[in-house]
Every structure is written in C-alpha cells, then in structure tokens.
Amino acid sequence: MKKYLYLFLILVVTISCKDSAVVEKIIAKEPAYFDWSAANVYFLLTDRFNNGDTSNDNIIDRSKETGKLRGFEGGDFAGIIQKIDEGYFTDLGVNTIWLTPIWEQIHGGVDEGTGFTYAFHGYWAKDWTAVEPSYGTMEEFKTLVEKAHEKDIRILLDVVINHTGPVTEQDPVWPEEWVRTGPGCTYQNQTTAVTCTLTNNLPDIRTESTEEVDLPESLIAKWKKEGRYEQEIKELDDFFTTSGLMRTPVNYIIKWVTDYARETGVDGFRIDTVKHVEESVWTTFNEQAKLAYDQWKQNNPTKTVHDDEFFILGELYGYSAVNGRSYDFSSGEVDYFDSGYDAMIDFGFKYFANEDYKALFKKYDSIRKNLLTEKPKDPAYFMNYISSHDDGQPFDPTRERAMESATKLMLSPGMSQIYYGDEIARSLVVEETVGDATLRSVMDFDNGNQEVLKHWQQLGKFRNKHKSVGAGEHFSLSHEGEGTLAARFYNKNGHEDIVLIGAGLPDGLMEIDVTKVFPKAKRLRNAYTIKKLPVVNGKVTVMVKNGVVLLEKM
C-alpha cells in the first residue's frame, strides 16, 4: 500500500504548477450516477426555507405592513447552504434543488385584494442583472452551487422572461417599446395567452417584437449609481456581437438570464410561464442557455462535476403528461419539447394519485414509455408533484394522507418534486391567509412530523440510489389482497439496476417470491427497515412497515 502511495506522491510532485488542474481532477471523487428522468427534486422558496444570515433581513426597506405571509421572512442563501452542509437534503435522497428566481425584486409592493404584498417569492423582477440583496450575494450563491455539487446535488434555477415586476412608487414601468400593460389574457387560443398580460399591473415583455430598442433610462441610472454601467454595456456588446441576435426586448433578457448559467454553474433552468411566450423565442432562449453553460464549463474545468448538457424544465400550466408531448390550445396543439425543453411539470399527477397504487404505477410507466418513444431521437421527460407554491388544489392540503403522499410520489415512474415541507407535513391551510399565501408558510424544522420525515427519507434515499425507481421498466407482480408488488428494471448508459417494491401493503410479516426479479440471490436487503433477509427456496419473509417494502441486492 505504501508503495502505491509513494508513486502517487511522486506523480503529483512531478506535475508542473501550470497543470494543477490535472492534480485536482485526479484526486476529485467520482460523482454519483445521475439520470435527469429519475431525478428527485426539492423545490423551495428561498425566503421561506431557512434564515442563515439575519444581517440581510432588512437590507432593503420593505417595512410596510403586509397581508399574512405576504412579506419577506428572512430566508436566504446562507440558510440553504447551512442545510446542505448539515446533510438535510442528502438524508432526503434529494439529488436536485430547485430555487425560485434569485435576481433583484421590485422594492415596493402592491395590494390587489389579497393584502399588501412584497416580492418575497422571486417572480417580480426589477433588475435581472443583480441578485436580490435579501437573499445574499452572487458570491454566496456560487458557494451554494459548489456546496451542492460537493454533495452530488444539482441546482435548477427558476427563471421568468415574459414579465417584469408590478409598477410601484419605487419601481417605474419599463418603456412602452419594452412592455405592454394590456389587454389581459383570456386564453381563448394561443394568441390570447401570449400577446397579453397575465394579471393587472404585471407588465408583459413584448417577446414578439423584432424592433431593436434602447435600454430603459431607469436601468441605466441604476447601473451608473452602482458603478457597473460600463461593465454591463461591454457585456451586452460582446453578447450581441457573438450571438448575432438583434437588440430586441426579449433578447436583452435572454442575455441577462443565461448569465446565471454562464457565471454560476447551475445545472439547469426551471422556466416559468411557458405558454405565454412564442415557441421561436424558447428555441433561442434554450439554445443560448446551453451555450452559456458550455462557456461556464470551459472556464471552470476544475469545478465541472458532470458532462451532461444544461437541463431545461418547463412550467406549462395545465400540461398533463398523459396527453403526450403536446399542449392543446383551442387553436391547435403545440409541442414545446421541439423548442429545446427536456421535461415538463406534470399537472395531472395530483389527480391520478387518488387511484390505487397498482393503477397509478402502471399509468405512469405507460406515460414514461410513450414520451420516450413518441419521438425516439428527442426523448421527453416529466416531473410529478403533490403540492406546489401556486397550486391551490394540492393532493393533501391538511396532510391527513402524508405517508401515502410520500409513497405514491417517491415510487411512481418519472421525476419527482418534493415541495418544501411535504416531508414534515407542513400544513397548506393557514388561517387568515388569502390566496396562495396559505401554501407559503415558513419552514418549521423543529416542529415537523418526524415520523413522516423518516418515511420520506427512507423512500427518497432508495429512489436516489436506484434509478430504476423513476426511470426503469415497470412490471407488476402477482399479488393477492391490498396494495401492490412490482419490479423495476433499468439498463441505460452501461448502468444496470433492479429493485422490487411494495406499496399499500398490510403491515406485518409477508412472504414474497423473488425468483422472477432476483433469480440467483442468496440474500436481499429491505432498504425501508434496513434489514438483511435470507432467500430460501426463492422466497423472502419481510416485515412490511407503513405499507412499504423496498428490496434491493446486497
């Protein structure tokens, strides 16, 4: 052993300083195997997750009294980093974190019948080129990304390009050649979902415009005050020269948003309001996002942790993966996957989750296969969820079915999205709130349901370890009585994986024939109870707990 250690030390010493990157590559750990189509995603609102640095809580004066849960609560990058370091996400089996938009939000607030509201959620942009000070700094965010990568966790950054923040006394309207302030969207066809404003006082970017425009005077003044006007102008000149794009409103925003891939190393974008932007714009945006990420990898070879392309996940409101790739406007169907999207959020899962386990798993295995084969050279993925930040009809708002929610989401084919607090049964019914505020309470780590948390952890770690759970071939096994037994087989990119899962089963001892799944196994492991089990005459006797069995090879 010492001989090899000496040889390694000689190798390191003899490599010149200019090749230090090679040394770092040699000693870097091999990243965990990853497949986006089986990703276990944790979605959080930065402001509502964890306050790790109280010094930035009031860095911008947003002190006007708000409606309940409609102001900033203090969550920040430091708080997320703290939980990454503690292993909170790792213990949940999370391999991807999705954060709401991080750029600077409007400084003022609005009252549109829901109580006075500030932009704590991140969807009301004031300046796409700056990080929201209440969350932290760009350097802190870069640290967050690096810390996540060290734990084999990828980062999805939420982005929105089709509207600015509302107009307030502190936040002037953008120039008329940049935005429209009406008419409101009526959703009668695609046109009335694109060339319109989502709500009152949410100026809509003229994404269809082919006219070149000057920068807004208010933005120029802001950059000059902050001492970065020259740098921003130089970067814009370089971008438009290199890309060959015209200086239209949306192309400015494409530059500003893709900078977050170019400068931070995030692994993908979750894109907001897909149906409200033209397909041609998404094609350009997604191309530029992937080019920006490639630039980051070229500039940061020692920080690059995988060779995958930049990942694009879309929020196409109302999309259900059961209908295939396309979204049906009354004026015709549109396949946004053709515009560079890799996956879409599935809005149907929360409804189908009311079916029994066997029917649910078979349905989503069929959906998975259809999306992979509809256009084989362009596979399409989908992400399931049970609750979210703006879905007023979640699967289990009062958390009376918290264990069932976890089992169905974690063991169903497809990508999975845990919404912060799902794992501790954070109630989605908060008294005295109006509208979506009830979905966005502050995470309470100390008082969450620990039994539910442990259930999510066991399922999540199993899902993360076994790509067959989310992306494998599903086979129902013969079983009489309540619940279901099934096998999942995965073989992709030289990686093979097999598991046998049980869900909705009666608790207690159960004998399972494993010959069709593990024909040569002498021993297996139930990953849910963490017990090693002998295989006797092709069968194992297993303890079912919380309706779950998770059998894997040892």
Image: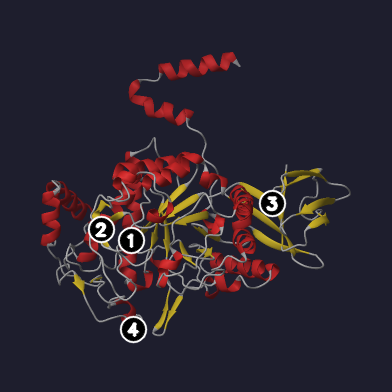
Please identify, in this view, whether the residue under mark 1 or under mark 4 is nearer the observer.
1
- Given residues 205 and 251, the one toward you in this image is 205
Report the residue marked by disc 2. Answer: 62
The residue beneath circle 4 is 186
Of the two numbered discs 4 and 2 in the rendering, the one whose residue sits closer to the viewer: 2
Nearer-the-camera pick, 397 or 533: 397
Crowd band around label 2 with a 10 angstrom C-alpha radius: few (<14), some (14–19), many (20+): some
User: Is 161 situated left or right of 81 in this image?
Assistant: left
Discs 1, 4 touching: Cβ within 8 Å: no
**Three-letter amino acid code of the residue under disc 2:** Arg
Which numbered tag is attached to residue 71? 1
Determine the residue positioned at 55% across, 54% down. 448
Contact, CB < 8 Å: mark 1 with mark 2? Answer: yes
Mark 4 residue element: loop
Residue occupying the point 27% across, 78% down = 196
Of callouts 4 and 2, the N-terminal one: 2
Instruction: Spot the residue most to the right.
Output: 537
Q: Residues within 10 Å of mark 1 (few under 14, many from 20)?
A: many
- Check disc 3: other Cα within 10 Å, few if <14, some if 14-19, many if 20+: many
The quadrant of the picture occupied by the N terminus is top right
Q: Say if mark 4 contacts mark 3, CB within 8 Å.
A: no
Does residue 67 sit above or below 73 in this rendering? Answer: below
**Is residue 306 among the parts visible in the rendering?**
no
Sequence order check: which comes first, mark 1 or mark 3?
1
| Badge 4 or badge 3: first in the primary sequence | 4
Q: CA distance from mark 1 to mark 2?
A: 8 Å
Residue 476 is left or right of residue 124, and the answer is right
Q: Verify CB contact (< 8 Å) between mark 4 and mark 2.
A: no
Classify mark 2: helix, strand or loop: loop
The residue wearing badge 3 is: 498
Q: Which mark is residue 328?
A: none
Per the image, label 1 sits on a secondary structure element best described as loop
